[in-house]
């Protein structure tokens, strides 16, 4: 009985998230977190365009709050907008942006869209990224195209720090699936070696010593070899009388 209540509760929570994303617009919302407090429900919306989401004098937020109370029976929803400073490092925003570009420009230009977005993500400072497009691109049969750049963890414990997201774009030829993986520049990797100024000085001194030793070896090889002269001494044989 408790399991059924928990599943139903999570379904209602998912409906709230989907309604917020659809009402505020595709490509503008990265994530929606819901926290339950004694005062009411605290809803945090992560977006790269807070001005468009809030609206003039907060009219969109007020309207959305009324809809959540009426449609989903929330007691006292409080919506908080969190701005994303670098949208090119957010996997969900990038996936939605690629899906929107495929819908506008068509599936024939999927390579141009993918390579351009790949370069923009790397220029934003990402350590590595991967874009996977699957669908009828542009042939009649569904195919999977993979575009990668940089360093990316895929297995083990470090793979959990990779930001992943999915999205879908509806084109004339059919639905195209978009998968994005981004390794952010502030990610802490266990196998990453950081070189400070002291280590640089030691490396510089060691390299100079090695260069000096190689130079001395070369000089020894180029020195002319001196031939040793051996004096031959002849002994007189004593005559036998």
Image (tube, helix red, strand yellow):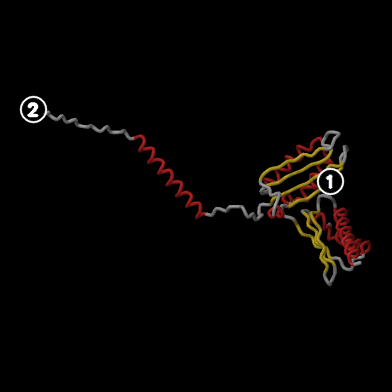
Is 145 or 184 nearer to us in this picture?
Answer: 145
Look at the picture and state if 174 lies above or below 82. above
Q: x%, y% of residue 211?
A: 43, 43
Please, which residue is most extreme toward the bottom here? 38
Residue 240 image label: 2
**What residue is at 72 percent from the left and 55 percent from the top?**
160
Counting residues from the start of the chain, the first of labels 1 and 2 encountered is 1
**In the shown orientation, is residue 121 left or right of residue 224?**
right
**209 in relation to 84, above or below:** above
The kind of secondary structure element at disc 2 is: loop
In this view, the residue in front, 82 or 74, is: 74
Indicate the secondary structure of the residue bearing disc 1: strand
Which residue corresponds to mark 1? 168
Q: Quadrant of residue 228?
A: top left
The 10 Å Cα crowd at callout 1, few under 14, some 14 to 19, many 20 or more, is: some
On the image, the x and y values in percent for residue 168 come to 84, 46
- 113, 54: nearer the viewer: 113
The quadrant of the image that shows the C terminus is top left
Q: What is the quadrant of the N terminus in the image?
A: bottom right
Say which quarter of the image contains residue 225. Answer: top left
Q: Residue at x 82, y 70 (%)?
A: 37
In the rendered image of this protein, does residue 136 appear above or below residue 32? above
């Amino acid at each position: 009985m408790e399991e059924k209540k928990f599943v139903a509760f999570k379904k209602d929570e998912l409906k709230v998230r989907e309604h917020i994303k659809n009402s505020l617009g595709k490509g503008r919302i990265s994530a929606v977190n819901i926290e339950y407090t004694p005062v009411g429900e605290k809803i945090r919306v992560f977006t790269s365009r807070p001005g468009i989401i809030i609206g003039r004098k907060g009219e969109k937020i007020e309207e959305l709050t009324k809809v959540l109370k009426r449609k989903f029976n929330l007691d006292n929803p409080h919506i908080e907008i969190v701005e994303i400073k670098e949208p090119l490092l957010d996997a969900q925003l990038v996936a939605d942006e690629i899906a929107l570009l495929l819908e506008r420009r068509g599936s024939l230009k999927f390579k141009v869209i993918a390579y351009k977005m790949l370069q923009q993500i790397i220029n934003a400072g990402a350590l590595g990224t991967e874009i996977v497009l699957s669908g009828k691109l542009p042939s009649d049969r569904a195919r999977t195209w993979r575009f990668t750049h940089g360093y990316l963890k895929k297995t083990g414990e470090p793979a959990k720090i990779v930001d992943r997201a999915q999205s879908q774009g509806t084109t004339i030829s059919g639905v195209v699936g978009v998968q994005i993986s981004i390794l952010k520049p502030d990610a802490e990797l266990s196998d990453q070696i950081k070189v400070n100024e002291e280590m640089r000085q030691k490396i510089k001194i060691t390299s100079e010593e090695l260069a000096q030793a190689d130079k001395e070896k070369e000089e020894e090889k180029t020195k002319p070899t001196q031939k040793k002269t051996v004096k031959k001494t002849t002994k007189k044989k004593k005559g036998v009388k």
